[in-house]
Every structure is written in C-alpha cells, then in structure tokens.
Amino acid sequence: MRVNMQLELFFYNECGFSQQVLNTIRNLKIGDQIVMKNIRENADYQKELVDLCGDAQVPTLKSDGVPMREAEAINRFLVDQFVD
C-alpha cells in the first residue's frame, strides 16, 4: 500500500461508470483518502477536469497530478494500491 499519494476523483452520480468506481472506493473503505470532485455539483471541478484532460469525461482519477481514465483501469489501480 502506497501512502502520501494525492488522489482526486472527478465524477458525477448519474454516470454508471462513476458508480462502479464509487462502489470500489466504498468496498475498500478508502473514501477518506480521496478528494471527491462531483463535476455536476461544482462547475470549478468541471473546469479543472477540462483544463487537465481537454474534456469532461468521468470517471477520471488524478493520482499525484496524473489523470487516469476508464472505470476498469481506475478500479484495478485502487485495488493494487490499497489491498495488501
């Protein structure tokens, strides 16, 4: 398990792929270690995501400043990082 990693998840609740990642975060009990950025509730988060990636595709996980996309890849990354 890696510590001191800065993680931010860009998502919105109506997105099924976002829900897959949110479920993984709940199952791993790591919600307190990820900054949650709902782009539908905060326009600044959406702007930040567009500035980072060029569009507003969710889910996007920013890990130490580097964006990662696709729910399956994000879930695999989270499991690799947080499961011993």
Image (cartoon, rainbow, N blue to C red):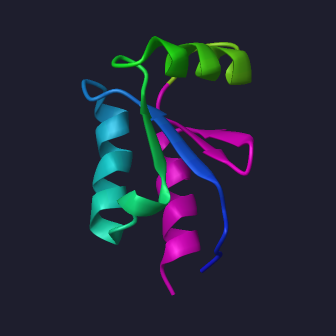
The N terminus - image quarter = bottom right
Q: Give the residue displayed 31% in from the left and 26% down from the top.
A: 15
Q: Position of residue 84 (x, y in %)?
A: 51, 87
Q: Nearer the viewer, residue 58 or 38?
A: 38
Q: Farthest bottom residue?
A: 84
Give coordinates of residue 79: x percent, y percent: 49, 69
Q: Tell me which segment is drawn in magenta.
A: 58-84
Vertical side of 26 occupied by 17: above or below: above
18 left or right of 1 in image:
left
Which of 43/67 is in front? 43
Which residue: 41% across, 31% down? 11
Among the 4 quarters of the image, the one containing residue 55: top right
Instruction: Report if residue 19 lies within the magenta region.
Output: no
The quarter holding residue 3 reads: bottom right
Above or below: residue 2 compared with residue 57: below
Q: Residue at x 55, y 44 (%)?
A: 8
* Rendered location of residue 16, percent (x, y): 29, 32
The answer to which of 21 and 50 lies nearer the viewer is 50
Q: Is residue 78 magenta?
A: yes
The residue under the point 64% across, 15% down is 50
x, y (%) of residue 75? 47, 56
Horizontal relation, residue 84 to residue 63: left or right: left
Labels in figure, total: 0
Q: Is residue 51 above or below residue 15?
A: above
Relative horizontal placement of residue 61, taking residue 22 as reference (left or right)? right
